[in-house]
Each structure stands twice: as C-alpha cells, then as structure tokens.
Amino acid sequence: MSTQQAPPSLQVTISSKQILAISLPIALAIMVPQVNFVINNIFLGALSTEALAIGGITGVFYLIFGVMGQGLNNGLQALISRRAGENRIDEIGILFSQGVIISIFLSILGISFTYFIAPIIFHSLLHDPQRANTVIEFLKIRIWGIPFLFIYQMRNALLVGTNQSKFLIIGTATEAIFNIFFDYSLIFGHFGFMKMGLNGAAYASIVSEVMGLLVIYLVIHYQKIGARFELFKRFSVRLEYIKLILVQSSPIMMQYMISIISWEFFYILIEHRGEQALAVSNAMRNIFGFFGSFTWAFAATANTMVSNIIGQGMQDKVIPLINKIVKWSLGFALMVCLLLNVFAHPFLSIYGQGEDFMQAGIPVLRVVSFALLIMSIATIWLNAVTGTGQSKINLAIEFVAIIIYIIYAYTTIEYLQLPITIGWMCELIYWITLLIPSYWYIQSKRWRDKKI
C-alpha cells in the first residue's frame, strides 16, 4: 500500500543556517528592484540632470504608496508566520486572499489621490512650476502600476511567511529584465519605440511590474503552492479576517507612510537648494536602497522568525534569535560601509554628472554609509517588534522618530541653510531614535502574552 508523503513542516528552527536560508533569497529579491532604480537613474542622468533630479521626487512619492503595500505585506507576513508556527495551515490561504482584496481597494485610493490631490500638493510646495507640471505628468502615468505592485507584494507575505523565500528572486529577476529593456527602449527611443524621455521610465516600470506579477503567480501555480493553501478558491470577502489583517497591518502601513512622507518632505527641502543638490540626494536614495537590501532582508527574517517561534511557544528564544540576526545584519553592513568609503568615486561616477557632482556627493556618501550601519541594527529590533504582534508599538516609535527627523531636517536645510551633508545626518538621528525604544521594548518582554 502506497503512502502519501507529508508536506514539509512550516515551523522554523533557531540557527544561522535557517536565518540565511530565509534572508539571502529575500536580499536578492529586494536588491533586484534596487538595481532597477539605479539603472533607471543612470538612464535619466544620461538624459539630463533635470530628469535625474525629478526622478528623486517622483520616486519617493511612488514609494509612499509602495510602502502601503509593504506595510500590509509585513502585517500579513506576521500573521501567516504565526499560523505556520501554530500549524494552522488551513487559515493561510484565507489570510492571503483577504490581503489581495485589501490591496485592490488600496490601489484605487492611491490612483484617486494621485489624480486629484497630488497636483495641488506639488504646485504648492515646489518652487519651479514647470518642474511641478513634469512631476505630475509622470506620476499620472506611473501610478497605474500600483495595483500590480500591491498584489505582487502579497507574494512576499505568502512565500516568506511559509519559509519559501527562495522563489522570490524569480519574479524580481523577471521584473528587472523587462524594466532595463523598456527603460532603454522608451526613454531614448531604441528598437523602433517612440522616444518618450522621462515618461518612458514610467511606462517601463509599469510593464515590468505586470510581468513580475504574472511570472511569480505562475511559479506559485506550478510549484503547487496555490493548491496546498487553496489560494485561489477563497476570494469571497471575509470581514473577520479583513479586520484581523487591518488591525495588525494598519499601524505598520501608517508607520511606513509617515516615514516616506517625511522623506518626500526632505526631498522638497533639498529641491529648494537647487538641481545639483536634488540630483545628489537622488543618488543617495539609490545607494541607500541598493546597499540596504541585506539589512531589509534580515529585518523581514526577524519579523517572520520571531512570529513563527512565538507561535511554537518558544518565547524564551526570541531575544537570542534577534541577537543572532543582528550579528549577521551588522556584518554585511560593515562590508558595505567599507566598500562605499573606499570606492566612493567609482560609485558616484556611474551617474555621469561630472566633477562638481562628485565633490558634492562624496561627503554625503560618507554620512549615508555610516547611517547604513545604524540601520542594520535598528531595523532588526524594530521588525522584531512587528513579529511579536505589537504593531501599534511600531507606530508609536516611528512617530516620535519622524518628529525629531523633520525638525532636524527643516532646521539644518531650510532655516540655517547648512550644507546638505549636515542635512543628511538626519538619517543617523532617525535610526538611533528607532533603535533605542525598539530594543527597550523587546528587552522588557511586555509582548510575551500578545495573541494575534
């Protein structure tokens, strides 16, 4: 008589091997779109300094909505990881389907905001009316990628929450290939395509997001992940699960949105200082994104592993686990910091902006590299708080950090008109302000009895 092989356990173990098995595929999956951003800005830099500068403002605006989906993803990931740790496999598909329904609703809100509210905001805040018109025209194209991005992000919660992060890279690699091809084709008008300039980057990004979504869901189908969790059979609205997801995710969504809105505020202050300052800061955003990929991967790992082991009833293992993840995260960040400081000139030269750009950018790059070190520790502890289910604590910590960040940025950049290198030190202050209360909260063990 034949016996059917049992599916592998979704419960994690506390080991470096498990940490790396989850985090490294996530790092690659995060790094690929960051490579997209860098290449996108290389193309825009070749187009003009103005295009590179505008890319900073539009990129951060789109990121505001992107992190809405990321917040939903993180909250959903904690829930799926907890159910995996508890071996309540039947609820994973339900949670996933309700997350997709919420993401569709959020995408409608994002598109509406961009068309009706964003023009008023940018015309009020940007000094150059023509630049404001260009930004708005670009965003009215780019925002149509939001529905595909949101649904695409739900695969993170599913694959990471069920310890199958190795499949993430397939979708992101597809997205990268299409984005690079269509960036080159549409911005400059190659391979028979119309030359669209800046707006070509918007269309290229949408095409790549559609293709990434298509490929990753084909992977989910052919790997029988969809069948195992019955992902595509439970798309009726389940209000009790929607409420559960929103209770867990909405504070994280608010936390991320506040963070990125403050970054948009920072870029608007930088815009007041001129085109070169804005172009330099856009390059720093790319560097932060690309080299922060490992840190964010370890942060996502902290979220899912902390939630999973709490689901297993192993609360006493949480702090040793976090310390182990912090060591790996800091180790990678130290290597990045060394590389950025030794090879600062080659990194900035890829933007092709000349020696003045280099002289302005290298001091800022030094500050950013050290901020990455603090971030590599702070974001692990902050995401561990998410894994405990205490997302409201995350929001409170973020709110305080952002207030300090905004006050410092406004005072140094706008009021005192200090060099932008001094302004960028707000990143150091921000991550330190996140680290201290996150560390204290986990050490206090007030999260031990939280049920989600």
Image (spheres, rainbow, N blue to C red):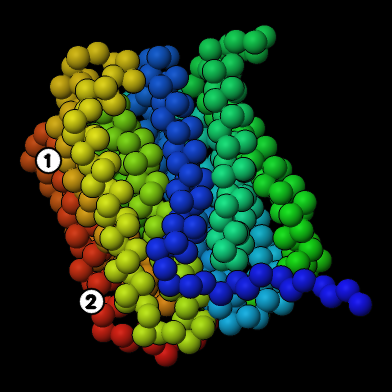
Determine the residue located farthest toward the right in the rendered image.
Answer: 1
Q: Quadrant of residue 318?
A: bottom left
The residue type indicated by label 1 comes to Ile
The residue type indicated by label 2 comes to Trp
Seen in the image, is 115 located left or right of residue 191? Answer: left
Residue at image position (59%, 22%) is 181
Residue 113's spot in the image, x, y percent? Answer: 53, 48
Q: Quadrant of residue 215?
A: top right
Instruction: Read off the residue under disc 1.
Output: 422
Residue 265's spot in the image, x, y percent? Answer: 30, 45
Residue 163's spot in the image, x, y percent? Answer: 57, 63
**Vertical comparison of 390 with 429: above or below:** below
Seen in the image, is 132 located left or right of residue 271? Answer: right
**Vertical comparison of 351 with 14: above or below:** above
- Secondary element under disc 1, as helix, strand or loop, is helix
Q: From where the camera sits, is residue 117 visible?
A: no
Residue at image position (71%, 70%) is 7
Instruction: Read off the residue under disc 2.
Output: 440
Residue 117's spot in the image, x, y percent? Answer: 49, 45
Q: From where the camera sits, is residue 312 visible?
A: yes
- Which disc, if any, is residue 145? none
Quarter the N terminus occupies: bottom right
Seen in the image, is 124 located left or right of residue 167? Answer: left
